[in-house]
Amino acid sequence: MLNVDEIRSVQLPKVLRGYARPAVDELVARLAEAFEQLEERIRSLEAELEDRTSARDELQRRLERTSAERNELASTVEAVTQERAEFVAAIEEIKNEREARAAYTDRLEQELGRYREVEQSLTGAILAAERSGNEARAHADREASLLIEQARTDARNILFQAQTERERLLADAQRIRSMLASAQAALDEPLPSRLDVSG
């Protein structure tokens, strides 16, 4: 394939009959100029193709980074979702435990009421025993005093247990509020955005 210099250096043989030399030289010059423009255009297209290839490679790298960042973000969201589910399960467990403790406290209060009824019944028995003879009365007094003391001891124990359970329930309620506040703060915290692909 001829290049521009070869076209311009073409020397056609002179003959008696043929084309006019100036016209041939002008045509060769025009062909050389056209060929030179064509070569320049080819070089320009090759440079543009190289630029586009570089741009395509850069875009591919950005897409890969974006895909990696998207996967990382998906993993972070999944971890946060899992942590939130664990918080919800823990709160539900604490709620059930609190309800169980409340029911247990109610049973203790009912038992305390029954002990008070027993105490009242014993008091009535003492009053009835006082109408008996001195001997039976003294014996009844001793028995009633023992029973009343035991009932009062049991009642004090039950009251102490009820107060202890009440304090534990208050502590559980405070712990639940703290956990709820921590969970809300964790959910309200914005996730870092790593989806910028400009760089």
Image: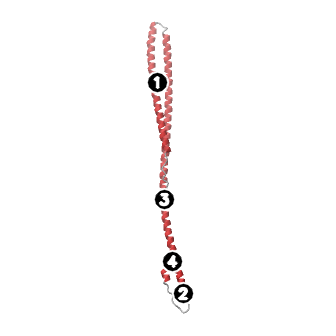
Q: Earlier in the sequence, mark 2 or mark 3?
A: 2
- Given this view, does label 1 or label 3 mark the residue nearer the observer? 3
Type of amino acid at the residue the image marks with label 3: Arg
Tell me whether the residue at label 2 lies in contact with that at label 4, contact meaning CB atoms closer than 8 angstroms: no
Which residue is located at x 44 percent, y 17 percent? 149
- Identify whether 46 is placed above or below 130: below
- Cα distance, mark 1 to mark 3? 71 Å
Query: Would residue 171 appear left or right of 26 to someone viewing this image?
Result: left
- Cα distance, mark 2 to mark 4? 21 Å
- Cα distance, mark 1 to mark 2? 129 Å
> Does residue 2 appear in this view?
no
Q: Position of residue 53 (x, y in %)?
A: 49, 66
Q: Position of residue 152 (x, y in %)?
A: 45, 19
* Secondary structure category for the residue under label 4: helix
Q: Position of residue 51 (x, y in %)?
A: 49, 66
Type of amino acid at the residue the image marks with label 4: Glu
- Cα distance, mark 2 to mark 3? 59 Å
Type of amino acid at the residue the image marks with label 2: Pro
Residue at the disc numbered 4: 36
Q: Residues within 10 Å of mark 2 (few under 14, many from 20)?
A: few
Q: Which mark is residue 22?
A: 2
- Given this view, does label 2 or label 4 mark the residue nearer the observer? 2
